[in-house]
Image (cartoon, coloured by chain):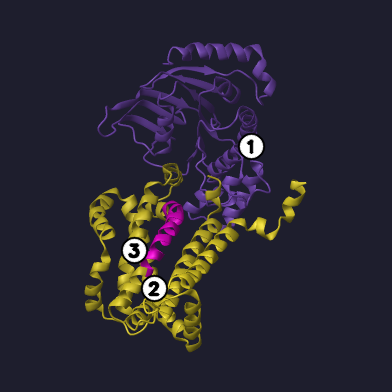
Amino acid sequence: MAAQDLPHASFIERYRNAVLGGLAVLLFFVAWQALFLIVPFNPLFITKPSLIATGYVDLLESGDLLHDLAVSAVPFFLGLFAAVIVGVPLGIVMGWRVRIGYALDPLMTVFYASPLVALAPLLVIFFGVGTAGKTIIVFSLAVFPFIFNVSSGVRAVDRLLVNVVRSLGGRERDIYLKILFPSVLPYIVAGARIAVGRALIGVLVGEFFAASEGIGHAISRFGDIFAIDRMFACILTVMVIAVVLTEGIRWAERAAFPWRVGR
Amino acid sequence: MVPYIHARNVNLTFRPPNRAPISALDGFDIDVEEGEFLSIVGPSGCGKSTFLNILLGLLKPDSGEVLMHGKKITGPGSDRAMVFQEFGLLPWRTVQNNIELGLELKRTSAAKRRTVAERLVSLVGLGGFENHYPHELSGGMKQRVGLARALATDPDVLLMDEPFAALDAQTRDLMQVELLRIWREARKTVLFVTHQIDEAIYLSDRVMVMSKRPGRAKKSFIVELTRPREYEMRVTPEFNDLKLEIWNTLKDEIVV
C-alpha cells in the first residue's frame, strides 16, 4: 500500500524538509510578535514583525528600497565579477606552478585571514565614496575565496588526466584549458558561495562609512533616526538576498556538474 | 632487419625527495617486431609500467637507448598511444568528446574528428552511447572509450598498461575477445602489460617475463597458438603447458 502511495505522495510528504524549515521560520516570527504582548518593550529600541511589515510596505511604495538595492547591486556585482576574473586565473597558476604558489601563499594568507574591513576607510579615501570605492572593497574581500579554492582544486587535479593530455601531444596551454580549468569549475562555484557572503559585507561596510544611497546607507540612516522598523525591513531584505544567492549557487552546483554525482 | 622497437641497456632510477632512490629499470633490453602483440608480465613494481611510460615519452631513462623506427624517442608522439589502467577519461566530456581529445590536440578539423569518432564508436561497440558521460558507463565500457581514444590518432603502437585490471573477471574475458577483434581490424603493434599469465598467452604472439626490481628482461616465450584465437584454446594442453612454464619462470621473481 505504501509503495502504491509513493508516486502520489502528498504535498507535505514531498516537500517535508522545506515545510519543516518554513514552519520554524514562521514560528519564530509568531513568537517574536507574541513576546510583545507579554513584555512591554520600549518601541524606540526594538520592533515587532507587524511594524516591520508596515515599514516594508512604506519602503516599497516610495520606491526607496528598490532604488537602494539597485545602487548597492552595482558595486556588488562589479566587485564579484572582478574577483572571478582575477582570482580564478591566479588560483590556477598558484596551484599548478608550485614555486609561484609557494612564493605568493604567505602574502595571500595574510590578506585572506586578516579583517580587510579595517582597510575600508583607507580604500574610501583612495577611491571615493561612490561605486569605485565600494567595488574595490567588495573585490578585495571576494577575491581570496576564489584564489584559495581554485588553487587547492588544482592541487587535487587527477594527475592521470594531465598525463593523458601530455601523452596525446598536448602542450602546457592544453593542460590549462582542457584539464585544469574544467577540473576546478566546481571549486570556483564553492569559492563563489563564500565570496558572495563576503561581498555583501563589503558593500554594507562601504556604505556604512560614507555613502549617500544604497542599502547599507539606508540601514545606518534608519538606525540614526531610530526608525527601527524600516531598519529591520532593510536588514531582513539583505538576509533574504544572502540566502537566495547562496542557495541558488548550491542548486546551480548540483545542476551544472552531473559528473560529480558519480563520484 | 632493424626491429621496430629497440631498447638496449635502459636504466632508470627514481629519486623521490627525502627518500632512498628506487632503481626501477636496470639494463632492460627488448626488441619488438612490427605488428607484433607482445605481453610483458612481471612481479609488482618491476618497472613494467615505467618502461611503457618511457616508450610513451612521459619518462626519460637515465641511460640506454630506446629507438622506434630507428629513431630515438624524445617525447610523446602521435605514433604511440596509451590505454591506461584507470581509464583516464575526462569526466566532463561525453564519450564522443573523449574519443576526439587526441585529434583536438593535433588541431584536426571538427568534421574530420567527428568522422573518426563515429567509426571508432562502432568499432569498439559503443553505438548509442556517444553522448553519455563516463560516470554513466560501466568499467568495461569506459575502457572501450579508452581504447577508442588511443586508436583515434591512428598510432602505430598501442601501449596498454594493465588495461583490464580494474574490471571484474567476466568483463575482463569479454574485453580480451573484443581486443583481439579490434586488433585484427586495426593492425597495430601492441605492448600489453599484465599480471595475468592467461591473459598474456591468450592475446599475444610473445610473452616476456621480467625480473623483480630493478627490472630486466628475464625470458621470452613464443605463443604457438593459431590465430584467430578461440576462447576454447585456453583449456588446451598446449596453453596450460606454456602457462606452467611461464609461471615457473615468474614465481622466483615474486617477493611476498
Counting from the top left corner in percent of width and height, residue A49 is at: 49, 74
Q: Is residue A168 magenta?
A: no
Question: Tag 1, which chain?
Answer: B
Magenta-drawn segment: A178-200
**Residue A71 location (% of width, % of height):** 40, 81
Point out residue B76 in the picture as x, y percentages from the top left corner.
41, 42
Q: Chain of mark 2?
A: A
Task: Give percent across and percent down for residue B115.
Answer: 62, 53
Helix or strand or loop: what does disc 1 sit on? helix
Report the disc number at residue B185: 1
Q: Nearer the viewer, mark 3 or mark 2?
A: 2
* Residue topped by disc 2: A76
- Residue under mark 3: which chain is it in? A
Q: Are marks 1 and 2 on the same chain?
A: no
In front of the other: label 1 or label 2? 2
Return the residue nearer the eye: A92 or A1. A1
Q: Are marks 1 and 2 in contact (CB under 8 Å)?
A: no
Circle 2: is it few (<14), some (14-19), or many (20+) Cα within 10 Å?
Answer: many
Q: Which residue is mark 3?
A: A143
- Please say whether residue B70 is visible from this viewpoint: no
What shade has chain B been given? purple
Q: In the picture shown, does residue B84 fall above or below A107?
A: above
Question: What separation in Å lies between label 1 and label 2 (alpha carbons)?
Answer: 60 Å
